[in-house]
């Protein structure tokens, strides 16, 4: 779809809404999380990273499993169990081969919560990582904005994780809810429901932070749709605007420019597919969710 970058830039200037408080009652997170200050010694954390650097024909149903390029930098940062602030304990790894898999071997942590982040670049002859962790910027070579994907994990529950577009948005929501006073347990329960509703999967279980989610074909399709939407958006504005919009509201439908852009893109993709394509139903459900205000 051909869209005026100037027009969307003007929309961006006025439409990204301010943070709103969540009205539900919450309990003191410090009381709920006191028992989370435990040591995890000499553990291994494994994962898979899903990431494409260009849109792929609206989640081509024949090519569902996506992988980050070999050499993509991955960072794991220990989080404070109450505030989700980083503690200063950080580990680095890289995605291997053509599988998008990575591992942090024999690491020790003082608490169970970590944020695992995926850089938008893979090391190669043309790019070598300089040790800094600041990738949220405009990439002139790609003519688009880039951002760091992430996932927040409780390592007591799982040590095999997935990083993808869905976990990217949920991470921002978790940070927002914790700042509002939610314990991470309560924030996770709420954010799981909100992100699933936002993409047309209301009532289904959020499993995108686990490698096993790939067994669900529909969830793979929806994650690919969301990733392609974010990639198209990044030609005009930062993906962080999408993540912040969901983080602030727990919804993608309340932000007019994002809603209209996503609906327009999804409608174009829907028209390009045959009625027998398995992605059609998920595109329709995604559109319906976006149109619910």
Image: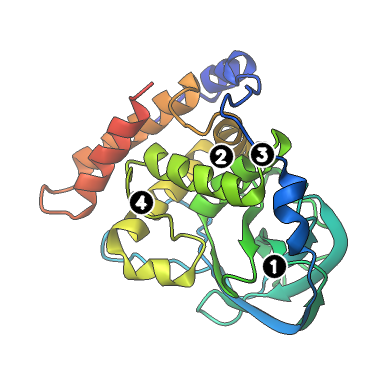
Tag 2 or tag 1, which sits nearer the N-term?
1
What secondary structure is marked by label 2?
loop
103 or 107: nearer the viewer: 107
Labelled pair 3, 4 in contact (Cβ < 8 Å)? no
Q: Is residue 171 left or right of residue 276?
A: right
Mark 2 or 3, nearer chain start: 3
Q: Which x, y percent locates residue 176?
A: 66, 37
Q: Is residue 104 above or below residue 179?
A: below
For residue 17, what is the image quadrant?
top right
* Nearer-N-terminus badge (2/4): 4
Q: Which residue is mark 2?
A: 234
Is residue 279 something that shows in the picture? yes
Residue 237 quadrant = top right
| Residue at image mark 1 | 74
Q: CA distance from mark 1 to mark 2?
A: 21 Å
In percent of width and height, residue 6 lies at 56, 20
- Residue at image mark 4: 222
Choose mark 2 or mark 3, whichever is in front. Answer: 3
């Amino acid at each position: 779809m051909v869209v005026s970058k100037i027009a969307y830039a003007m929309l961006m200037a006025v439409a990204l809404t301010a943070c709103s408080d969540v009205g539900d009652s919450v309990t003191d997170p410090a009381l709920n999380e006191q028992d989370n200050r435990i040591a995890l010694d000499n553990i291994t954390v494994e994962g898979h990273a899903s990431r494409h650097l260009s849109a792929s024909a609206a989640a081509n149903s024949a090519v569902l499993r996506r992988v980050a390029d070999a050499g993509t930098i991955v960072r794991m940062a220990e989080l404070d169990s109450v505030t989700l602030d980083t503690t200063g304990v950080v580990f680095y790894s890289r995605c291997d081969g053509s599988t998008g898999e990575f591992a942090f071997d024999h690491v020790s942590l003082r608490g169970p919560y970590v944020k695992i982040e995926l850089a938008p670049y893979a090391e190669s002859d043309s790019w070598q990582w300089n040790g800094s962790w600041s990738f949220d910027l405009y990439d002139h070579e790609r003519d688009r904005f880039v951002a760091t994907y992430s996932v927040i994990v409780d390592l007591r529950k799982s040590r095999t994780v997935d990083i993808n577009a869905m976990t990217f948005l949920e991470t921002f929501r978790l940070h927002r809810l914790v700042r509002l006073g939610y314990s991470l347990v309560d924030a996770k329960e709420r954010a799981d429901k909100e992100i699933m509703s936002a993409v047309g999967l209301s009532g289904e279980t959020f499993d995108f932070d686990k490698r096993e989610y790939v067994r669900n074909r529909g969830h793979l399709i929806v994650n690919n749709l969301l990733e392609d939407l974010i990639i198209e958006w990044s030609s005009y504005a930062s993906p962080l605007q999408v993540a912040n919009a969901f983080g602030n509201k727990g919804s993608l439908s309340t932000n007019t420019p994002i809603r209209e852009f996503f609906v327009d893109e999804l409608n174009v993709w829907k028209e390009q597919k045959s009625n027998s394509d398995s992605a059609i139903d998920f595109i329709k459900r995604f559109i319906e969710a976006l149109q619910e205000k």
